[in-house]
């Protein structure tokens, strides 16, 4: 099938490269000329495992992937996936103006198209957005009748950063949301090469339900982590190792061990934003969801819990503290909603000199949080040298291998926020919830 993907961010680029992998002819549309030029050189514009080789292969060898700034190129395709940003407003609700402008431009472009075209919303949007905003926008701008000349569906993504390509190619489920048969048929055709190849559940549903499935998934997982952190805080107070408890809980088929890693909590581009957006959508309708509000409350508590453990051991005023990890999780350079930002703030409030290390995220941290005051070390050893405390905030595998490096600390206090170090002789080790 010939497919266009609008947007070359984390989701759009992954989607475009993976569709090309499935054998589709893909054109990726983005307004950013530099991003388009990067893709057309055969390089992904973002850091994501499995993408460099795929983008290179499909741009330079198979010829199934190219990028453009020209919306008219969607006319050569049969379906368009919209993967545009939906930033958060101050009240947590999502700002749909980029989606609206992008789909209006798409509709105008499609006004000259002969025959049927399917438009698919890929971005995470609150229930009703596809039906009540995007479909009417596309229909009005194109002058085409919905369900007769043009269809608008919704196909949420469940891609984790760092494993997005693998998540796409071996999904637990594929959700196809459509409000008419032809759109659903096109969605099935797009995913057929995948559903024929791997054993995955295909959920066919309406667009409102598809939209809600994405939020429900992320809200559930975020709340699961917050619940184990809430239990973890109790465990710590009572002298119990949360990880031993979680391992036993995970043996119950109704619970499973996944997303029971207690620690500093959740960050990233999805959990915080999606929970806030669905809470805001509920609030708009007059319902204030107590469980999801509590999930956020527990999550916000975790960096402060770790800093209070630090206060129990040492006064860091005027002293160096090593902060290992800035990315919101290992395997990515993404610092959106990283727990490390709250840690840097809390440490500088205490008068500490923060020396941070991260193998991938330093540049983004500087750019995203210019107000934060921290120095950067080239290696964990450099950050630890002379430090009065060390906080591990991201579970990068290299940190688990640290050993003699701790000997250079002025005071060998190690606070592990991610359960990724072993206690060892010569250090004072404190786990956040164990
Ligand atoms: C998430 C969803 O998993 C994915 O399906 C969705 O589409 C996008 O959001 P991502 O944000 O990339 O993916 O990261 P994920 O691996 O799910 O972790 C989210 C956050 O939860 C991270 O900050 C991670 O450190 C934290 N987490 C996860 C825990 O604290 N404990 C756990 O047991 C699991």
Image: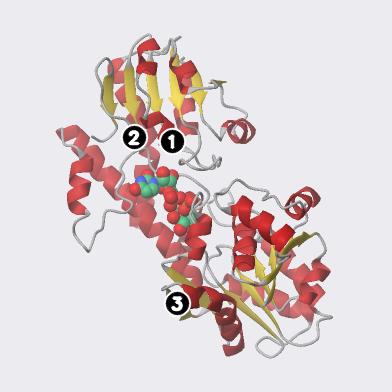
Residue at 40% from the left image edge and 40% from the top image edge: 300
Q: Are marks 2 and 3 in contact (CB under 8 Å)?
A: no
Which quadrant of the view contains residue 423?
Answer: top left
Classify 83 as above or below 387. Answer: below
Q: Nearer the viewer, residue 271 or 55?
A: 55
Residue beneath disc 1? 396
Which quadrant of the view contains residue 60?
Answer: bottom right
**Residue 168 drawn at (x, y percent):** 51, 63
* Label 2 residue SS: loop
Q: Are marks 1 and 3 in contact (CB under 8 Å)?
A: no
Q: How many marks?
A: 3
Residue at 29% from the left image edge and 43% from the top image edge: 229
**Residue 54 drawn at (x, y percent):** 62, 57
- Mark 1: few/some/many CA within 10 Å (<14, 14-19, 20+): many
- Mark 2: few/some/many CA within 10 Å (<14, 14-19, 20+): some
Q: Nearer the N terminus, badge 1 or badge 3?
A: 3
**Residue 138 drawn at (x, y percent):** 72, 76
Q: CA distance from mark 1 to mark 3?
A: 34 Å
Q: Are marks 1 and 2 in contact (CB under 8 Å)?
A: yes
Left or right: where 310 falls relative to 199: left
Classify 174 as above or below 394. Answer: below
Quarter in which the N terminus is drawn: bottom right
Task: Check residue 420 in the rendering and tell me which mark sits there, or answer none.
Answer: 2
* Label 1 residue SS: loop
Which quadrant of the view contains residue 372?
Answer: top right
Specify how the rendered protein is coloured: secondary structure
Task: Check residue 202 in the rendering and tell me which mark sits there, or answer none.
Answer: 3
């Amino acid at each position: 099938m010939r497919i266009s993907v609008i947007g070359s961010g984390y989701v759009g680029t992954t989607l475009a490269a993976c569709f090309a992998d499935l054998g589709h002819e893909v054109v990726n549309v983005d307004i950013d000329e530099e991003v388009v030029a990067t893709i057309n050189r055969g390089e992904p514009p973002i850091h994501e495992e499995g993408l460099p080789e795929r983008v290179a292969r499909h741009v330079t060898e198979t010829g199934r992937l190219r990028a453009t700034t020209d919306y008219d190129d969607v006319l050569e395709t049969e379906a368009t996936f919209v993967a545009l940003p939906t930033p958060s407003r101050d009240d947590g609700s999502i700002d749909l103006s980029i989606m609206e402008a992008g789909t209006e431009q798409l509709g105008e472009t499609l006004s000259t198209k002969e025959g049927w075209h399917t438009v698919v919303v890929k971005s995470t949007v609150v229930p009703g957005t596809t039906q009540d905003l995007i479909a009417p926008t596309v229909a009005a701008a194109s002058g085409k009748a919905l369900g007769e000349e043009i269809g608008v569906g919704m196909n949420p993504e469940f891609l984790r950063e760092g494993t997005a390509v693998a998540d796409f190619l071996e999904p637990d489920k594929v959700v196809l949301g459509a409000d008419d048969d032809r759109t659903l048929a096109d969605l099935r055709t797009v995913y057929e090469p995948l559903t024929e190849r791997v054993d995955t559940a295909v959920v066919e549903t309406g667009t409102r339900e598809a939209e809600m499935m994405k939020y429900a998934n992320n809200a559930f997982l975020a709340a699961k982590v917050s619940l184990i952190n809430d239990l973890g805080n109790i465990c710590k107070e009572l002298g119990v190792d949360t990880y031993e408890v979680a391992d036993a809980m995970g043996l119950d088929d109704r619970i499973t061990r996944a997303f029971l890693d207690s620690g500093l909590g959740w960050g990233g581009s999805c959990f915080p934003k999606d929970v806030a957006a669905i809470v805001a959508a509920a609030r708009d309708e007059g319902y204030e969801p107590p469980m999801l509000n509590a999930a956020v409350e527990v999550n916000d508590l975790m960096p402060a819990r770790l800093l209070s453990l630090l206060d129990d051991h040492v006064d860091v005023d005027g002293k160096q503290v090593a902060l290992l990890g800035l990315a919101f999780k290992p395997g990515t350079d993404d610092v959106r909603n990283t727990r490390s930002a709250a840690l840097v703030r809390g440490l500088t409030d205490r008068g500490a000199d923060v020396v941070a290390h991260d193998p991938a995220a330093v540049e983004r941290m500087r750019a995203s949080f210019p107000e934060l005051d921290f120095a950067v070390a080239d290696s964990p050893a450099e950050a630890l040298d002379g430090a009065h405390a060390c906080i591990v905030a991201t579970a990068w595998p290299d940190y688990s291998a640290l050993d003699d490096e701790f000997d250079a600390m002025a005071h060998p206090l190690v606070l592990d926020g991610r359960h990724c170090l072993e206690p060892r002789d010569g250090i004072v080790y404190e786990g956040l919830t164990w």
